[in-house]
Amino acid sequence: MLKIIAGAYNDGAFVKKIGIRGYFINTLWLVSRPVSRLIAAAAVGIFVIRYLGPEQFGMLSYAESFVTIFLPLVSLGLDQVLVRNIVRDRDATGSLLGTSFLLQLAGALVSFTLIVPLIFVPSVDALTRYMTIIIAVSIVFRPLGVLDIYFQSQVTSQWVAIPELIGVLISTLAKAACIIFKAPLVCFALIIPIESLIIAFGLIVFYCKKKLSFAIWKVDWTLARRLLSDSYPLMFSGFAMIIFMRVDQLMIREMMDSAAVGQYAAAVRLSEVWYFIPGTLCASVFPALVSVRDLDRGLYYHRLQNLYAMMFWLALSVAVPLTFLSGPLVEILFGQEFTQSASVLRIHIWGGIFVFMGHAGAKWLIAENMMMKNLHRTLAGLIINILLNLFLIPRTGINGAAVATLAAQAVAGFLYDAFDRETRMSFLMKCRIFTPFWQVK
C-alpha cells in the first residue's frame, strides 16, 4: 500500500505537503470506519440476527435493501467526481461543495418521495412497509456526505472517522438495549436513521471546528451541469450495481418468503463484510493515481497493476478459509436456525475476487474519464444476475441466487473488459496476475 502511494506521488507537489506518513495515517483512519462496523457486527450484530430469527431478520433486510436501491439517486454519482475535481482545482472547492450539496439534497427528496408510494405493493406486509419508510428517513442526511468527500480530498479522514465511530458506538449500544429489553422489530429500523443523524451532525461539528465556513459554499448552475454530465454514468452504474447486489434478496422475497431472505441475508452479511477492504484502499490510493497520471504514464500503469494484484490476493485470502469454515462458522455465529446460510456462503464468498478487482478497475475508469464504461459493465452483470435468478431460484432456491450473483460479479468485475476495445488493456492487466513470471518479477 505504501509502495503504491509513495511511487505514485513521488513527483507530486501535494505529497510534499501531506507526506507519505500523512497518507498512511489517512488510510488507517479510512480503515477504522469499516473496521468499527465489523467489530460492532461481531459484538452485537450477530446477536441481532439470532434474536430476530430468519423471518424477522428477512423482513428487516428486505426493508434495508429496498431503500438501498435508491441511494445512487441521492449521491448522483458525484462522490468520486467531486474528489477528482477538488484535487485538480482547489480554488473551486466552495462552488464544488455548495453545488454538489444542493444536487444531492434534491436527489434525497426525490428518492424519499418515490420510496413511500412504491413500497405499497400488495405483496409487502404492513410492518415491512412501515420499517421501509422509517429507514428511508436516513437518506435525508446523506447530502452532508459532501463533507466526507471534502475531508477525503484533503487526506484528513480522521474528521470523518470520528463521527462515524461515535455513531456506530451509539447504534451498537442501542441494538444491545433492544435485545436485552426484548424490543419489537421496528425499534431496530429506528436505529438506522438515528445513526445517520449522529454522523451528519458530527461532520458539521468537525467542519466548523477546522474553522471552515459554509459561507464559501456557492451554487454554480454551469458547474452543476458539468458535474452531472461527468457523474450521471456513475449514478446509473451505481443503480445497476446496487440492484444486482440486492435484487437477489428482493426476488427471493417475491418467489419464496421472508424466512428464505433471512437465511440468504445472513450469509451475505458474512460474505460482504470484507467489501470495505477494496473500497477503503482504493479510496486512499485514488488521489495519488489521479495526481501521477499526467506526470508519468508508465509509473501510473505500473502502480495500477500492483493495485489489481493486491486486490486479487486480498480477496483470495478471504475466500479460501471461509469456503472450508462456512459450516461451523454459521452454526457458531447464528445458530441452528440458519444452517441453510452455510451453503450460500460457500458460493457467495468467491464473488469477492471480482468485487475487489472491480473496485480498482472502476477507479481507473474514473481517472480516464470513461465512467460510461463502468455503467456498461455493471448493466451486463445486472442482466446476467436477473436472468439467472429467474431460472435458478425456482429450481435450487437460495443457493441458485448465490450462483447468479457470483456469475454477475464475474461478468461486471472481470470478463466484460475483454469485449471492449478501450478496456481490454485493463482485462489483460488483471490476467497478468495469474502469470507466474509477473508474480516472480
Image: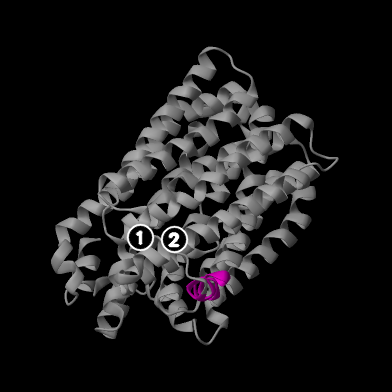
Asked whether the beta carbons under mark 2 and mark 1 sit within 8 Å of each other, the answer is: yes
Residue furthest toward the front? 215
Disc 1 residue crowd, few under 14, some 14–19, many 20+, Cα 10 Å? few
Q: Secondary structure at mark 1?
A: helix
Q: Secondary structure at mark 2?
A: helix
The amino acid pointed to by label 2 is Gly
Disc 2 and disc 1: Cα gap in Å?
8 Å
Q: Pinpoint residue 232: horizontal percent, then vertical percent.
A: 57, 70
Q: Is residue 342 visible?
A: no
Q: Pinpoint residue 398: horizontal percent, then vertical percent.
A: 69, 44
Q: Is residue 121 magenta?
A: no
Q: Pinpoint residue 405: horizontal percent, then vertical percent.
A: 62, 56
Mark nearer the viewer, 2 or 1:
1
Q: Give the residues drawn in magenta, as a range.
A: 222-233
Badge 1 is on which residue?
Answer: 216
Q: Is residue 430 above or below residue 332?
A: below
Q: Is residue 261 above or below residue 381?
A: above
